[in-house]
Image (cartoon, rainbow, N blue to C red):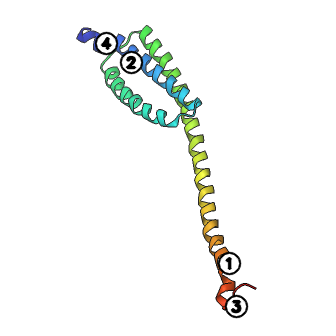
Amino acid sequence: MTMTEAHGPAAVIAGYRRLRVQVAEMLALTEAEDWDTLIERQHAYLTQVERLKALDADCELDAGDATRKAELLEAILADDLVIRDRLMARRDELGQLLDRSRRQRDLQRTYGRQGSAVRHGADTTGKGSP
């Protein structure tokens, strides 16, 4: 590959195609609820976005390539929106689980102490159990 090909319109379009594949894979991970792998893939995705920004800034596209780029970008952004919505739903779900866990812990602390005091209360009179 020559320097021109590595930095030309073909490289830009190829970069958007790769990005489109990455975001489609990430969308599939949200459908499978594979959150750990999704987070791992996000780093590679963001790295690719940064490279593509720099490459795209240095390249002028003809009308056909600009149209293809716009189509790819539209698909990327549509999938990205769905991914974000699913991540927000997951965040809300985890927040609810944390709240529930906190309430259970607080109830256990409060009523656990009272239960313990009630059980030991008869013994503190010195009379013991009948």
The label number, if any, that marks residue 119 in the structure image: 1
Residue 45 x, y percent position in the rendering: 41, 28
Q: Earlier in the sequence, mark 4 or mark 2?
A: 4
Front residue of 118/40: it is 118
Q: Residues within 10 Å of mark 4 (few under 14, many from 20)?
A: some
Q: Residue at x 52, y 36 (%)?
A: 35
Residue 18 x, y percent position in the rendering: 42, 18
**Type of amino acid at the residue the image marks with label 1:** Arg
Cα separation, mark 2 vs mark 3, equals 83 Å
> Which residue is the site of mark 3?
127
Q: Residues within 10 Å of mark 1 (few under 14, many from 20)?
A: few
Front residue of 110/94: it is 110
> Which residue is the site of mark 4?
8
Whether residue 75 sits left or right of residue 100 in the image: it is left
Cα separation, mark 3 vs mark 4, equals 92 Å
Marks 1 and 2 close (CB-CB < 8 Å): no
Of badges 1 and 4, the one in the foreground is: 1
**Type of amino acid at the residue the image marks with label 2:** Gly
Cα separation, mark 4 vs mark 2, equals 11 Å
Cα separation, mark 1 vs mark 4, equals 79 Å
Q: What is the tally of numbered marks visible in this picture?
A: 4
Question: What SS does tag 4 mark?
Answer: loop
Marks 1 and 4 close (CB-CB < 8 Å): no
Q: Earlier in the sequence, mark 3 or mark 4?
A: 4
Q: Earlier in the sequence, mark 2 or mark 3?
A: 2
Of badges 2 and 3, the one in the foreground is: 3
